[in-house]
Image (spheres, rainbow, N blue to C red):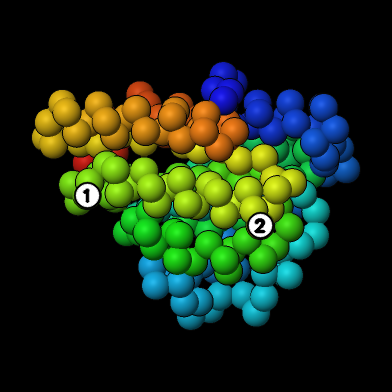
Amino acid sequence: MRVVKGGLVGLLFALACSGGGGGGGGGAAAGTARDVATDSAGRKTPGAGESPASMASGRVVLFLGTSLTAGLGLDPDSAYPMLVQRKLDAKGLSYRVVNAGVSGETSAGLLRRLDWVLQQPVAVIVVETGANDGLRGLPVAATRTTISQILARIHRDRPEARVVLAQMEAPPNLGPTYTKAFHAMFPALAAEHGAVLMPFLLARVAGRPALNQADGIH
């Protein structure tokens, strides 16, 4: 297991420099959740693209996640995957970001739609899931099993892809036993499946009202 030190863009830059693809030549246009988004039952949402083949060109970075990835309450261009796209473009890396976040989704919902989103060739897959499991107080063991199945299926269907697993945290009101177990499952899963662990997505943001929306979560 590796831990991202310089952020996701630093990881992608390192991949490009080591032959991971996509250096130079200008940036590729970013995709949005409209291209591949499905609901939590795995069905295509209205307005989704005709086929994942529409995203097959270039070096694709696929972001799978919840409302934190989808950008709930934000302009679509302000969601963090789109910010990553702009940083990649500025570095001259020809990766194309595709935002396939679905608001309100649990890890089980992501597992159900995984076959659809994995139809496209991808260079990097960023998995941000489990936060809604924690908010609902779902058993940590069940969430861990589901995320393990997600990572195993990615490895099976897209063995060429580099996988980044985002660390997530459970709300403290669930108690120290739950929150410690929830925290510990992410590095354990990353090590088990050979994924790169990205530190907590909301580090230095969570709990700071000036950096959050009115709900205190996003």
Q: Residue at x 19, y 33 (%)?
A: 178
At numbered mark 2, what does the secondary structure look like: helix, strand or loop?
helix
Question: In the image, 33: left or right of 187?
Answer: right
Q: Residue at x 49, y 52 (%)?
A: 150
The N terminus appears in which quarter of the rendering? top right
Q: Quadrant of residue 181?
A: top left
Residue 23 in the image: x percent, y percent?
84, 36
Q: Nearer the viewer, residue 15 or 79?
A: 15
How crowded is the residue under tag 2: few (<14 C-alpha within 10 Å), some, or many (20+)? Answer: some
Q: Residue flagged by tag 2: what amino acid is it?
A: Asp
> Farthest right residue?
25
Q: Which residue is mark 2?
A: 157
> For mark 1, what is the residue?
138
Say if residue 133 shows up in the picture: yes
Q: Which amino acid type corresponds to the residue marked 1 in the rendered image?
A: Leu
Query: What is the tally of numbered marks visible in this picture?
Result: 2
